[in-house]
Amino acid sequence: MTDPKEGSIVIIGSGLIGRSWAMVFASGGFKVRLYDIVKEQVTAALQDIRKQMEELQKSGMLRGNLSSEEQISLISGFTELKLALEGAIFIQECVPENLELKLKIFSDIDRYVNDSAIISSSTSCLSPTKMFNGLRHVKNCIVAHPVNPPYYVPLVELVPHPQTEQVTVEKTYTLMKKIGQSPVKLMKETDGFVLNRLQYAVISEAWRLVQDGVISPRDVDTVMSEGLGMRYAFLGPLETAHLNAEGILGRAD
């Protein structure tokens, strides 16, 4: 086994997203500390991770260059936050989408973390401003919103707080690339970020077409799964427009 990469990744919350993130970071050769407040929850999470990794190895779908046993050995469980955060280089928060809970978690992290560690949230809807305002380490704070489950879907939206330093964005981007994810950088906060805004636009129009009697629910799903979805798996909407007719410049008006 190669030496694990320097420093530890700390996952806050051992639910489905936290477990998946732990597996992703371990696949990249990082030591991972999985934290939760209930010992039994942490134990169950570690057992589930072992089971998933062993099954992934058997099916030839395990990520990374290390064996399942080597990756499992990189993940340890913690129930004491201060201890878990010692030597952390990157913290990925994965608690439920409850602002009050997240504010408490980030306040606690802010007290214990060193000045160079990056503090990241997996939130899918809460703005960085709501979560990170007033933190001593706000310049190190960022949202890294994954698509569920991160182990199988690589997209990660990076959303900075207005006071987030650019070096935090770049370090997070580099880290995500290193572990095999596909990060995108948002230049500023926006409600719903980008993935959900695009997704909601499609869902909204799908409902409208069904309600107006234009198409059945089954067929609108077929339009996506057998048409647009297959295209968008390889090309984004702007790439598609550029490859059509006169390209993107022909649509400038």
Image (cartoon, grey):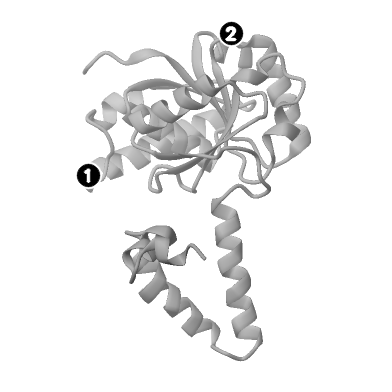
Mark 1 vs mark 2: give the one in front: 2
Residue 115 percent coordinates (x, y): 59, 8
Left or right, 114 with reference to 20: right
What numbered label is drawn on residue 114? 2
In the rendered view, tell whether residue 222 sits above or below residue 171.
below
**Res 78 → quadrant:** top right
- Left or right of 18: which side holds 58? left
Task: Name the kind of residue labelled 2 in the image.
Answer: Asn
- Disc 1 from disc 2: Cα separation: 39 Å
Q: Is residue 102 in view from this perspective?
A: no
Q: Nearer the viewer, residue 144 or 28?
A: 144
Is residue 90 depicted above or below 98 in this figure? above
Q: Quadrant of residue 163?
A: top right
Q: Residues within 10 Å of mark 2 (few under 14, many from 20)?
A: some
- Numbered label tally: 2
Q: Is residue 71 above or below residue 212?
A: above
Q: Which residue does the image show at 49% across and 48% down from the upper left?
A: 148
Q: Residue at x 34, y 15 (%)?
A: 5
Q: Which residue is mark 1?
A: 58
Q: Amino acid at mark 1?
A: Lys
Residue 143 % position (x, y):
59, 34
Secondary structure at numbered mark 1: helix
- Name the residue located 32 percent from the left edge and 23 percent from the top edge: 29
The residue sitting at 54% across, 11% down in the picture is: 116
Is residue 135 or residue 150 the one in the foreground? Answer: 135
How packed is label 1: few (under 14 Cα within 10 Å), some, or many (20 or more)?
few
Foreground: 137 or 245?
245
